[in-house]
Image (cartoon, grey):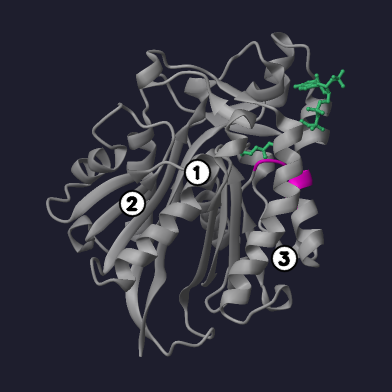
Amino acid sequence: MTGRAVVVGVGHYLPSRVVPNAEFEATLDTTDEWIRSRSGIERRHFAADDETTSDLATHAARAALADAGMEAGDIDAIVLATSTADLTFPSAATMVQASLGMTRGFAFDVQAVCAGFVYALANANALILSGQAKRVLVIGAETFSRIMDWTDRSTCVLFGDGAGALVLEEQEGTGSSDDRGILATDLNSDGRHRDLLYVDGGVSTQSTGHLRMQGNQVFRHAVEKLAKTAETALGKVGLHSDDVDWIVPHQANIRIIQGTAKKMGLPMDRVVVTVQDHGNTSAASIPLALSVGKARGQLKQGDLVVTEAIGGGLAWGSVVLRW
Ligand code: UT7
């Protein structure tokens, strides 16, 4: 028998303020039509001034725990993917731990920008497979609205705030790709491309900074690398694109999502798409899409799901799991 990290609960949270594309037309040389046609985004949510990343994460975590029929005390570890933590330290994960009233176990953040949730899932899977934890809350939560340059139309119209969470639990599997749970992971980064997407500030440079992106360059890397990482992860367990029921991609741009599906030879009716409603929520986008995909009745127990993401670093990767 083989231990498997199985998804037993999922949930999400979106701040109440919804910002339609048209709102940017008042302050920027842009249009709803440009944003829709170039990115697929129609609206996004922005956190209130007093709402932090750990607040969003806590709401999503509670929803996932409720879905799993569990309480905070049942959880051994929290792995939280974010690039927009409340404070420089402690980690947002320990803040969520305290908010949930979880007084044992351990919690830490993972920072791999838009690929953060894929990295967090791979870490949580490793914790479970190594016997360090039996039940792990894996969260993606971001407040990218805090690092936007509101005068830069090429970036500020693309991002949004939100959080999503999964509960992973160790269950016995047979070792075959028919098992439920995480079947394979593939992680990559290449720091030579760090200038394509970054924040021009940080603790050691003594400022907060704003997000800077050469969007068309990132686009080019995304289309090339995402299908490849998904196929690499599938290949590790002897599976192919044909076996996939759902791609749940990072939600940055509908054209990247369509390009990746096409490269994998999969029709768009096997892709969970939420970019129109959420914009790019960085590490939160995949767990948000998993939660919305389940609520819509798209993801069903036993389905083969592939998640894939790319972002600043560049960092990219994928996770293959049976829902
Ligand atoms: O999540 C992390 C990973 N990030 C991504 O995956 C984002 C990847 N990139 C993208 O999604 C796309 O590249 C964008 C949506 C950012 C841009 O689309 P594009 O088709 O690559 O356009 P572009 O950057 O080549 O710009 C085309 C034109 C430019 O004008 P000129 O130089 O051709 O005159 C831009 O100045 O569109 C202009 N432009 C805008 N026009 C109206 C850029 N932003 C806007 C805007 N409204 N908001």
Q: Residue drawn at (47%, 43%), measured in percent from left and top?
A: 112
Q: Secondary structure at mark 2?
A: strand
Provide the residue designation for mark 3.
270
Viewer-nearest of discs 2 and 3: 2
Q: Which mark is residue 234?
A: none
Distance from the alpha carbon under mark 2 to that under mark 3? 28 Å
Up the image or down, 145 lies above or below 2; here it is above
Sooner in the amino-acid sequence: mark 3 or mark 1: 3
Residue 227 horizontal/vertical position (percent): 71, 59
Amino acid at circle 1: Ala
Name which residue type carries label 2: Val
Residue nearest the viewer, comparing 42 with 4: 4
Q: Please tell me whether residue 260 belongs to the stretch shown in magenta.
A: no
Viewer-closest of 227 and 151: 227
Residue range corresponding to the magenta coloring: 252-257
Q: Which residue is mark 1?
A: 283
Query: Where in the image, quadrant-wise, is ligand 1 located?
Result: top right
Q: Position of residue 65 (x, y in %)?
A: 32, 58
**Whether label 2 touches label 1, CB < 8 Å:** no
Classed neighbour count for the residue bearing mark 1: other residues with Cα under 10 Å, few (<14), some (14–19), many (≥20)? many
Whether residue 124 can be seen here? yes
Q: Secondary structure at mark 1?
A: helix
Q: CA distance from mark 2 to mark 1?
A: 12 Å
Residue 266 locus on image (x, y percent) = 78, 67
| Element type at mark 3 | helix
Q: Which mark is residue 79?
A: 2
